[in-house]
Every structure is written in C-alpha cells, then in structure tokens.
Amino acid sequence: MRSCASLALVFRRQPLAVLIAALCASGAQAADAPADKEVSLSTVTVTGNSDYQAPTEGTGLYTTRKSRSATGLKLSLKETPQTVSVVSRSQMDDFGLNSVNDALAVTSGIRVEKVETDRTYYTARGFDVTNFQIDGVGLPMMYGNVYGDLDTALYDRIDVVYGANGLSTASGYPSATVNFVRKRTLGDFAAKAGIKLGSWNRVRFDGDINTKLNEDGSVRARIVVAKEKGDSYLNRYKQDKTLFYGVIEADLDNGTQLALGHTWQESKSTAAMWGTLPMLYSNGARTNYDVSTSSAADWTYWNNTTSNTFAELSRELGEGWKGKATFTRTERTSRGALYYLSGQPNPTTGTGLSSLASLFATDSREDTLSLTADGSYTLGGRQHELNLGLSAGLAKHRDASYYTVTGGAANPPAVALDRWDGSTNTPVFASTPGGSADFKQSVYTAHAATRLNLSDGLHLIGGVRQTSLEQDGKSYGESRQTSYARATFYGGATYDLSKDQLLYASYAEIFNPQYQINVNRQTLKPVEGNNVEIGFKQELQGGKGNASVALFRSEQNNLADAGGNFADGTAYYRGINAVAQGLQADVTGQLSERLQAGLGYTTMTIKDPGGNEARTFMPRQMLRLSATYRVPGLEQLKVGGNLNWQGDTYAVYQGSEIRQKAYALLNLMARYDISKKVYATMNLNNVTDQKYLNSLYWGSWGQGFYGAPRNISVALNWTY
C-alpha cells in the first residue's frame, strides 16, 4: 500500500487526502469482503452475442465492470486511462432518476445547466458537453443542448468519460462524453410494471416486458413504455411525457446477431418559459422572487418529439475478431408558441420589462452509419488488442420563427412577476417566418486504436482519428459554411502497481469547429488545444467497485464566450483562450456487503491568458454522493441518500454581479420489499427546502430561475 500512502501525501493540502486514504483502505479489505448480497427480484440471463456487455439491471450494483465508451476497446474501468463514472440501472431505480437531467445530476462531474423549463445544456471540467453517444455510436449534434425532458426508462446505464475523447467521437473536447447504453433483450421471460405518485399532482406509469419469440430463444423482443404527467412547482407549468422503446434481437447463426430497435418520445408542456426571470432591478439590486414565479404567459406551449431507429448487425469474423455495422436515424421536431421577457424591472413597481412573442417550428434529422472491427494480434511474442472503425453522418436542420403580425409582441405584464397570473393578450402570428435556419452537416471519420501489452504490468494505448466535416447553409441570415479535415491523436499508458491498483496517464488533441458568430458576424474559427490527465485507479470488492483520483489540464484556444447582443437581440461571441485544470476523484459501486455508493469530488480553476477567472457561471468545486444501505435484521428494507454540493458561482450583467452562493441539496430514499415480486419506494427531494438558482449559464444576459423546493414521491413496483 506504499503507492496509496504516497498519493495521499502528494495531495496532503487537498481535502482528497482523506478520501484517498479511505479508498485505499477499502481496497486492502476487498479480498476478505463477503460476496455481494443479491438484491434483484429476478434472474437476468444473457443470450447470444459474445461481445455483449453484461447489463447492470438486476445486479444491484452502482457500476459496471467493462466499458467501450472511452477508446472503443473493451476495457475495464480500471484499465481505461481516463476518469469514467457510471449511473447504473439500480441507481436510477433507487433514486427515481426518471429523466436524463436527474441522472446526469448525480454523476461525479457533470453540471446540469437548466436554462429554461424545456432547454438544458451540460458542462464538465470547465467546458460544455457536446459529445453524446448511444450504445457507443456518436451523434452529429448540431447544437450542444437538449430540448424537452428525455426519459431514462429505456437505458441500462449511462457512462460518462471525462476529458477529451477524440477516438470514439468526431472531435476531441475536454469536458466529457456521455454514452447512453440501451436495455437489450434477455434470455428468459421477464416483466416489470410500476406506478408513481408525486408532489404537484404528478403521476407516472412505466412497464417493461421481455419475451422469447421462438422456442429456443434465438429470437427475442423487449418493449419499454412510460407515461408521466402533472403540474409543477412553477406557476402554470404542466408537462405530459410519453415514451415507447422496442427492440428485437435474433441469433442468425452461432456467430451472427441482428438487432432492430425503435424509440419514440413525446414531451408536451404548457406555460413553458422562453428565457426566464430578470435577476436584477433597474437600480442594479438583486431580485428575489418566490421559487414558483414564472415568466411564461398562460397561452404558451413547447412540444418536443424525438424518434430513434437503429439496425445493428454483429458477426464473429474468426481468429478472435468481431465486426459490427450500425445504422441509426434520429428525428426531432419541436413546436412552440413562446413569450420572452427581457430588461430590468422597476424596484418599486416590479414592472417595466420588454416582451417578445414568437411561434417556432424546428425539424432535424441525423443519419449515422458506423462500421467497427476489433480483435487481437501478436507482436513481440505478446497478444495486443486493436479496434478499427469508419463512420459517416449526415445531419439536416430547419427551423423558423413566426413573429407577431405587428412586429411587436404580446403586452408585458402590468404587475410584478411574482403577482402575475400569466394573462396577456394572445398574439396573432405572421404566416411567413421572420427568421429561419436551413443547413446541413456531413461528418466522415476513420479511427484506429490499439492496446500494446508491453509487459504483464505496462500497457500503452494509442490511436488516431481522421475527421472530415462539411457544413452548408444559413442560420438566421448568418452563413454556416465551413469545411475541414483534421487528424487528432490520442495516447495513454497504464502501469499495474498490484492486481487491483494502477497508475495511468493520457493525452488527447482537441480540434472542434464552432458555429457561433463574432461581432463582425463571422463564424468563429475552430477551437484547438490539448487535454492531459494523470491518475490512480483501484478496483474494489473484486471488481464490484471502482475508485480513481486524477489530475487534469485542458487548454483551448479561440473558445466561444458570450460577447453581447446585436440590436435585433441576436447574440454574438468572442474567442477566448482558456485553461482549466484541477482534480477529480470517484468511488463507485459496492463498498461492503450491504453498501452501494457513488462518490465524486471535483475541484478546478478556469483562467484566461491574463490569469483572470473565466466562465465563472461554473462552480469551481462540486461534491456528489449517492449511497444505499441494506438494513441488517430487516432485509426487506433499503435506505439511502443523495447529496449534491457545489461552490459559489457568479455572472456579470450590465456591470452588476449576479451570484449564487454555495449550496447543498439533500435527497433521501427508502425501499421496502413487500414480497419477492412487489416492492415500494419513497423519495424525498430537497429535504432542507433549499432555495437556489438552476443555473447562471445565461447569467450574462441577466436571467435565471429557481430549482424545485421540497417534494416527495411514492412508487409501487411489480416484477416477474
């Protein structure tokens, strides 16, 4: 254990010293720890694909043993030379994490930037998260935000790879890559249904059924459905969400498998906010609305629909090699009638805001074809791993804004927002758009990654990804014309200190095109830079838990940063050089026979070349903790808690500071197994009724809104 002690000594001035000592102690006890107590209510049997990753459902664990999310190579989390955190199916079920926003909010290092009721950005390690995958296949995202409230019922787990990930995504970006891993079919019949009731008249139903379609089980099907609707803590806001997911998998022969699947989700909301609340009065003083205050008119709505269809063919190629071809089509539509308030109200009357109304119609389609092959080869008397891949992606995007026929808007509120009931004249919108976007993007990539096993303890990972991107069209009068071809390189090394412990280092280049325009209405040049990470990892409880601590440094040049607004309200940006560096530590999975936990701590600095703080809307410190414990002597009962703490943040608007002080959110849960097939859960969120702003991501525009107050939900679940 000398290596652990040395590492704790290095970080003796950090609060992580205690954490490092604790996780090392856990590792020392792992060999004598009892086996995991089975907490699932049904047996999970996997059939067919030898490359199939064992699901997390049914295990009760808060981690996974292996993941391809970082390099394309099938490595354990310990062997991956980057920080990887996992939100497992068990963790989502325990804490009622039914939306992607809720699930990512418990990861060790992602910050969910909820800027409006139905639009969200994500940030990590100082920068925006723009790389997303489904089952390891990257998506050609046109923008770095998500519309609506995406459901998690169809996912087995969510992997988050921190730092630049240029091998498995089209561009290296030093924040994180999020990989959504779908549920797949099981070998035996299984079923689950649940009903959930919560604060603000919220009701949710979900169902999940898996069955064999022929006698020998070589053809299997699974269907997942969910329906959720209700009111909100925000005045007038209502939401109605529907999800369907179906997948069929067939073993065509001993070495060939085919999977066909489709997901459809509709998320409808009324009284949706476009923009949020003014954070400053006209005299520069801070506003302080009730958490339920909304800037949405009562006639507004925002409806978002997403569908995803995929076909996947995998084949054993012989000599230990496997090939896979995946085609994915994603279609998104968004329709809304929205109402925007801007300005700074009078401190006495609370009035004086300006308003704008618009009807929106957005349609996008993304097609992706991915071909991969992986296997092993012999060099220097040792076996090594190799992963090869080609991909082609085409994305099309159209949207239009239909402003009011008078060129103005619905009248602004005649009273202060906290006394407004949402009533204002319903506008008549123009039949032709006042602004529109129509552009397309094509991305072609080729990559190769290898893991060289130089000795029993020393391993090198290296790879290169060639990316060609072309974009053509216009967005609200601005050209989206761009074209580039660039190769990015990745290198990593791991050294085993023992069977369970290792040291690692990785380096990745960054090259990321941008769509934002500057004050001269010209598209900003691509971001260039690099990302470096060094760290220590340890497996706990024989691989049922994982721990890591890492130092990271990311340098980006010409990164888009908010610059201001033109007279028509369109935003412009400036390119800045920024350096983010810090420390991240994770402990996830089984820590004892009865304890499952996920712990993450991040501390960092983000500065420009002049040494000034940059991107101050992001917290410099975050602590995340989720844990559940099976109660001795009362085996049917499991209790747990979730703690989310972050340091203070601020933004500057019109020369005045908007600050969110450090705060902590505490959520509690309890689960009671009524029988082998029926169990009940209760979740109490924001136990201390903390008042806080969801995000200051748009703080430099003077806006923000408050998060949910204390709320409760209860659920009854049946499994077979």
Image (cartoon, rainbow, N blue to C red):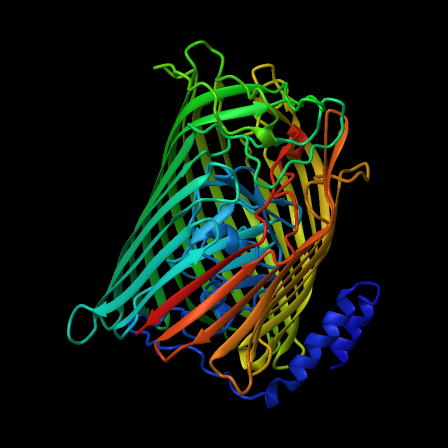
Q: Residue furthest top?
A: 406
- Residue 287's spot in the image, x, y percent? 69, 32
Residue drawn at x 62%, y 36% as measured from the top left: 704
Q: Residue furthest bottom?
A: 32
Quadrant location of the C terminus in the rendered image: bottom left
Compared across the picture, whether 37 is left or right of 719 comes to: right
Quarter holding residue 626: bottom right
Instruction: Choose between 38 and 497: the one closer to the eye.
Output: 38
Instruction: Choose between 495 and 93: the one closer to the eye.
Output: 93
Question: Compared with residue 399, is residue 621 higher up or lower down, i.e. above or below?
Answer: below
Residue drawn at x 36%, y 61% as measured from the top left: 195
Question: Compared with residue 554, is residue 672 higher up or lower down, i.e. above or below?
Answer: below
Compared across the picture, whether 209 is left or right of 412 comes to: left
Instruction: Choose between 642 and 224: the one closer to the eye.
Output: 642
- Residue 225's spot in the image, x, y percent? 31, 56
- Residue 150's spot in the image, x, y percent? 43, 48
Residue drawn at x 28%, y 55% as measured from the top left: 261
Q: Residue furthest right?
A: 13
User: Total label count?
Assistant: 0
Quadrant location of the N terminus in the rendered image: bottom right
- Residue 454's spot in the image, x, y percent? 59, 73
Question: Compared with residue 480, is residue 134 higher up or lower down, i.e. above or below?
Answer: below
Whether residue 634 is visible here, answered yes or no, is yes
Residue drawn at x 62%, y 55% as measured from the top left: 109
Whether residue 56 is visible here, answered yes or no, is no
